[in-house]
Amino acid sequence: MTRVVLRPNRPTVICEVFEDEVVAINLETGAYFGMSDIAREVWRLAESEMPLDDIIAHLAERYSKEPERIAADLASFTSSLLEHGLVVEAPADGSAPAARFTGPAGSWEAPKLAVYEDMKDLLLLDPIHDVDETGWPARKQDVVA
Amino acid sequence: MSVCTATPVEFTEAAETCFVRAAKASGLHKRAFILGGHRIEMQFAGTKLLDPMTRALAHCAVPVEGAAELRVCFFDTESTGTPMARPAWSPDQYTGSGQIANFCDERVETSYQLWWDVFQCLDRERKVALYWTPSWRVLPWWEVSFPLRVILHWWLRDTEWQPVHAAAVGSADGGVLIAGPCGAGKSTTALSCLGSRLHYAGDDYTLARVGPSPHVSCLYSTAKLDPEGLERFPHLAASVTNRDRLDREKAMLFLNESQPAALIGGFPVRAVVVPEVTGRRDTALEPAAQSLAMLALAPTTTKHLPAARARTAAKLIRLTKSAACYRLLAGTDLAQIPEALTGLVERLNRNAIHT
């Protein structure tokens, strides 16, 4: 079976690793995302091109949990990453040395993606197609404050 | 409806020709300002847009002489009787963010704000920008509070400067940016510092220079308060300039007119403070991760300002990584807010001087 990696969807996505949180930005949608704690670890492992099944095995060992439990929790998180266009699936080519976490681990909690979709209202705006005889958008009667 | 064909550069030239016609018809008026160390000349055809577009910048005014780094032309069709050039794009190119899709390039930026009928463009090579609206009467009240916001954002794209959605208070030695979405408490926090040892550099948009030693410049002298906010500062009520329109506008103050001594031109940024209204009486400050500052500053700044989202985000990352971050747990006893912030700023300034 082909092993897959979750690659950050660059250049559409830019991300920055802060001390305790990864902030990612989807430049197409304008949405911002925060990943802290275990989500931050998963992102960093994915960024290092560690194949998904290796991430599951590494986290299962690190947090002393059943791989099935880790896999189930990761499935929801990774589908959120894919749904928001933050990562793309690619076949693992094993060219990049994958990072591993060795420091103290807390207790396992399913990773979460915090979504800041402040742009959504603008992006879903239906453009106004009515123009007047000058070619400019037809004037509205009321100015929206 | 036919669409005239012109490149972005050709369109900006045609638009400027319209401005020249408008100025011939209604008179040319010039004003100059130093904004973040940059000399900008604003030129107006007629007078209808002159006061609305310059009042918030009056504290940065300088005599009109010498070469400006950027010239910005303003006109409206109704008061000058001069039509704007016909759009060289189709209606489906208008976008919610204001940017005109596929009608901008490395040299030219264009936007049309559908909600308030304002067209803006910038030609980087010719160092000229243009602001046009069909009628000065439809200009929304908030445009008066942050003139040039979009044009400065475009023009400063390749520099270390960036208009940021943040309030700022501090002293000449240093101060803080106050970040958060609309309604987070930026204005309340900044205005609570009036009369304290911290001076005011803005409550909504300020001009930040990113880099290892970040700096903020006071761009606008305005303060805006919703009705609840105004109730918290009854002593400011007499300075509100739009008292007859408070049913549909936020209360607007021009502090360069009512409290000029409270303003400061700028200062080094020591920290980003993210307010959180707690409803409790007392105020407290607690250290927070720099990612909080990023998530407080960046989504709203990139939402408000069209284009160059990646470059803007990159600048904001640099800014937030070179400043400390604190959460301000803002209480209802407003006097405690300047006390807490003054203590923080003075401590950070001492640390910065000793390192």
Image (spheres, coloured by chain):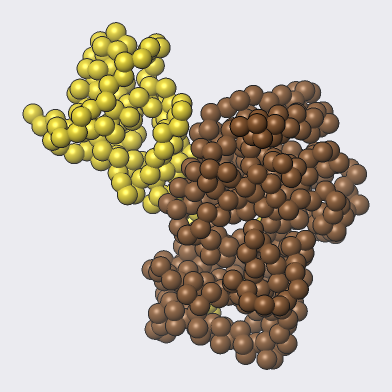
Q: Residue at x 55, y 75 (%)?
A: B128
Residue B236's place in the image compared with B44, above or below, is above
User: Residue B325, located in which quarter of the rendered image?
Assistant: top right
Relative to B195, B135 lies left or right:
left
- Residue B123, position in %: x, y? 49, 74
Residue B119 spot, x, y in % from top left: 56, 72
Q: Residue furthest top?
A: A64
The front one of B63 and A5 is B63
| Quadrant the N terminus of chain B occupies | bottom left
Can residue B184 be seen?
no
Q: Picture quarter containing residue B343?
A: top right
Quadrant housing the C terminus of chain B: top right
Chain A takes which shade in the image? yellow
Q: Residue at x 48, y 56 (%)?
A: A125
Q: Position of residue B105 (x, y in %)?
A: 40, 69
A53 shown above or below B150:
above
- Identify which residue, A24 or B206, lies in the foreground: B206
In the orientation shown, which residue stands out farthest toward the front? Answer: B354
Image vertical order of residue B333 relative to residue B223, above or below:
above
- Please count the marks in the image: 0
Work out which residue is located at the far left of the displayed protein and give it.
A1
Residue B71: x percent and y percent? 61, 75
- Write down which chain is painted brown: B
| Frontmost residue, B234 versus B176 | B176
Q: Residue at x 70, y 72 (%)?
A: B32
Residue at horizontal 57 percent and vertical 43 percent from the top: B213
Q: Can residue B15 be spotted in the picture?
A: yes
Q: Is residue B234 shown left or right of residue B35?
A: right
Q: Is residue A78 above or below residue B262?
A: above
